[in-house]
Image (cartoon, grey):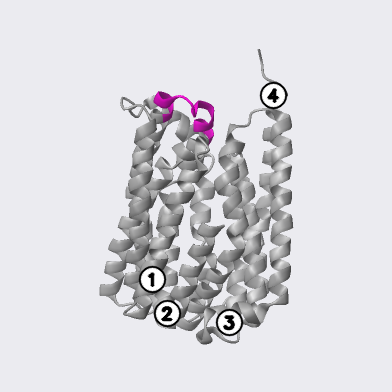
């Protein structure tokens, strides 16, 4: 919670320090970076967690999986950077950035994506071994580094490029220590294997259609407002989205702490009990946070600064949308941690139908319309993910085979 809170404070400091024009470009840059993250993964991280949960105490086998996954992600990254480039340049120029500034942002984000990709793979080792304290210390150190540098920049000179460089320094710290910890555990002779490559691809293949779909849909609010709105609306969507990030703390904690343990469970009774516990805990905590947001909208908007005064009516929708997206992401992560992703692509046509309905009912040129367009259609995915979870639980053994 402390790590998430420090990250939230950094984000709010950026919102208050940057002008609306700069923050519009920053919003587009972060959305483009998320697309690159997604395209360089395409289910590999979840497949690694699911397969690693079976061999987490075997240093050689775990090392082979880690190195195979990293090799695959590098290959995906080289392809994903093409789409990332197209999205970044088109949206950044529409948001008001110059061509020179966009090129600089492209370089910074590409390096940041490589560092973060390295960390997400290497951190699987301490996550599977429930070495939470070490991960907490590293995440907190990186978060404090970002907060300190952003605070210093806000008192001197701050711009979109400077904030992105500071974010990249945090990724560098995580990548360095994460890889050192992984190498201290996995066997030195571990090398990528064709068998592991096939196993990862077989498991991640079911996620690829959804990953490709969600890499665009996940940034639907920013993309829509960039097309139909103006610089002011782009900045407001980004700022309100940053405010909503504090309400995803609960989901982040469950994802970081619970998922690795959930991936190691094998028996049907354990899976049912833990699945219900996680979902109920999220709904209870999320409901309480949503209630507070409806009680204190003025205070929430005050956090963003005077530039965003007048968004009280929209902040409630932002919080509700953030919690909804976080919950759907949690359900997906629980399924993916156990490899329950076969048939997940059926969620795409369901969500597309919901998109058409939302587009017909919402004004996409407004902040509220763009935010709701990015969140509401995702509920259609639950109609597919929940039955997949039930099918996976029913197929689990009731007891350990002697």
151 with respect to 384 (left or right):
left
337 with respect to 31 (left or right):
right
Disc 4 designates what residue? 397
Callout in the foreground (4, 2):
2
Disc 3 designates what residue? 302
Task: Report the Cα–Cα distance between label 4 and label 2.
Answer: 55 Å
The image quadrant of residue 275 is top right
The image quadrant of residue 326 is bottom right
For the point 62% across and 56% down, the residue is 250
Quadrant occupied by the N terminus = bottom right
- Neighbours of disc 3 within 10 Å: few (<14), some (14-19), many (20+): some
Quick one: SS at disc 1? helix
Q: Which residues are magenta?
A: 50-62
- Neighbours of disc 2 within 10 Å: few (<14), some (14-19), many (20+): many
Task: Report the Cα–Cα distance between label 4 and label 3.
Answer: 53 Å
Quick one: SS at disc 2? helix
Disc 1 designates what residue? 150
- For the residue pair 155 and 211, the one nearer the viewer reads as 155
Disc 2 designates what residue? 17
């Amino acid at each position: 919670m402390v790590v998430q809170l420090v990250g939230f404070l950094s984000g709010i400091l950026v919102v208050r320090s940057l002008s609306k024009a700069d923050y519009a470009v920053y919003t587009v840059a972060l959305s483009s970076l998320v697309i690159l993250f997604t395209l360089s993964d395409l289910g590999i991280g979840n497949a690694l967690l699911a397969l690693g949960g079976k061999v987490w105490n075997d240093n050689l086998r775990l090392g082979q999986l880690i190195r195979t996954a990293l090799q695959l992600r590098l290959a995906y990254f080289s392809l994903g950077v093409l789409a990332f480039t197209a999205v970044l340049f088109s949206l950044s120029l529409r948001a008001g950035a110059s061509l020179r500034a966009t090129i600089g942002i492209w370089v910074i984000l590409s390096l940041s994506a490589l560092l973060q990709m390295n960390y997400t793979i290497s951190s699987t080792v301490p996550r599977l071994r429930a070495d939470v304290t070490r991960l907490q210390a590293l995440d907190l150190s990186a978060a404090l580094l970002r907060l300190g540098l952003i605070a210093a920049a806000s008192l001197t000179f701050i711009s979109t490029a400077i904030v992105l460089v500071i974010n990249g320094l945090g990724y560098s710290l995580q990548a360095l220590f994460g890889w050192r910890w992984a190498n201290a555990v996995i066997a030195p002779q571990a090398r990528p294997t064709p068998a592991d490559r096939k196993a990862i691809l077989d498991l991640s293949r079911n996620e690829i259609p959804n990953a490709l779909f969600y890499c665009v849909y996940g940034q639907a609010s920013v993309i829509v407002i960039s097309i139909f709105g103006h610089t002011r609306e782009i900045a407001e969507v980004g700022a309100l989205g940053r405010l909503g990030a504090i309400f995803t703390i609960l989901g982040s904690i469950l994802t970081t702490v619970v998922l690795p343990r959930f991936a190691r469970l094998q028996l049907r009774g354990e899976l049912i009990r833990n699945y219900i516990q996680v979902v109920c805990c999220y709904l209870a905590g999320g409901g309480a946070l949503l209630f507070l947001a409806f009680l204190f909208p003025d205070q929430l908007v005050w956090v963003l600064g005077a530039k965003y005064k007048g968004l009280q009516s929209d902040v409630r929708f932002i919080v509700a949308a953030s919690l909804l997206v976080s919950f759907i992401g949690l359900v997906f992560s629980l399924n993916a941690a156990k490899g329950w992703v076969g048939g997940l692509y059926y969620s795409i046509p369901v969500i597309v139908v919901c998109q058409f309905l939302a587009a017909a009912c919402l004004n996409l040129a407004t902040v509220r319309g763009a935010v709701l367009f990015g969140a509401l259609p995702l509920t259609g995915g639950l109609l597919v993910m929940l039955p997949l979870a039930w099918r996976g639980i029913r197929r689990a053994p009731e007891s350990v085979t002697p």
